[in-house]
Image (cartoon, coloured by chain):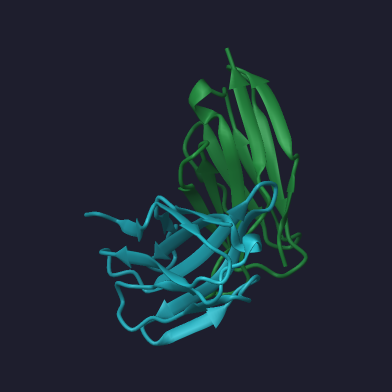
Amino acid sequence: NAGVTQTPKFQVLKTGQSMTLQCAQDMNHEYMSWYRQDPGMGLRLIHYSVGAGITDQGEVPNGYNVSRSTTEDFPLRLLSAAPSQTSVYFCASSGGSRGYTFGSGTRLTVV
Amino acid sequence: QQPVQSPQAVILREGEDAVINCSSSKALYSVHWYRQKHGEAPVFLMILLKGGEQKGHEKISASFNEKKQQSSLYLTASQLSYSGTYFCGTASQAGTALIFGKGTTLSVSS
């Protein structure tokens, strides 16, 4: 079992560029979420999904889009990168009343 | 709304005990606890559902007071490996994502 796989691990973008952060899980989990982590701010919820075809906004959704066409994949799209989106991004999945398994994270820098 | 964790930081010697608290202004369905080491992803410790049961292992356990919307994480006889940042995550109902607190940094020295 690979668990939750995030790619890329590191990325540098220029302001205004777009990109997609990939997240895949092989545990057949229904629930998947995207978080960003900034110093002193904890983990802030961007978007989440409770199953294929169903997504919802979290605490800080502006500037990000998601889709969930399959159970396994939950990509996060940055539409037009801004320096304020410099952060560490974590994808996580859960099978219900169990804990979340986190991916190893993507460290994104926007210059 | 983000749950509030206290204290922000704890410094311990090996063998000492610590309590980390998590409180919410909203009615809660579940509380999760995670530990994150520097440069790594958060790792799940335990989940508590409505009912106020205390769960966990001998040295790391947690309680959930449903009436007060509060949870506490108890670390007993701390070890060096307990160092890290502890996060509580809360869900107001089944099927919703977790909202995390800002974390409590625990440092254990020998």
**As drawn, is B68 to the left or to the right of A3?**
right
Front position in the image: B79 or A71: A71
Residue that appears at 29% across and 72% down: A72
Residue that appears at 61% across and 37% down: B74
Q: Colour of chain B?
A: green
Figure quadrant of the N terminus of chain B? bottom right
Q: Position of residue A41 (x, y in %)?
A: 69, 53
Residue that appears at 53% across and 29% down: B82
Q: Is residue B79 above or below residue A18?
A: above
Pick out the residue farthest to the left: A1
Chain drawn in cyan:
A
Residue that appears at 49% across and 39% down: B39
Kindly indicate the quadrant of the structure image that contains residue B76. Answer: top right
Q: Position of residue B10 (x, y in %)?
A: 70, 30
Task: For residue B50, say whether it is visible.
Answer: no
Kindly indicate the quadrant of the structure image that contains residue B89. Answer: bottom right
Q: Position of residue B25 (x, y in %)?
A: 78, 65
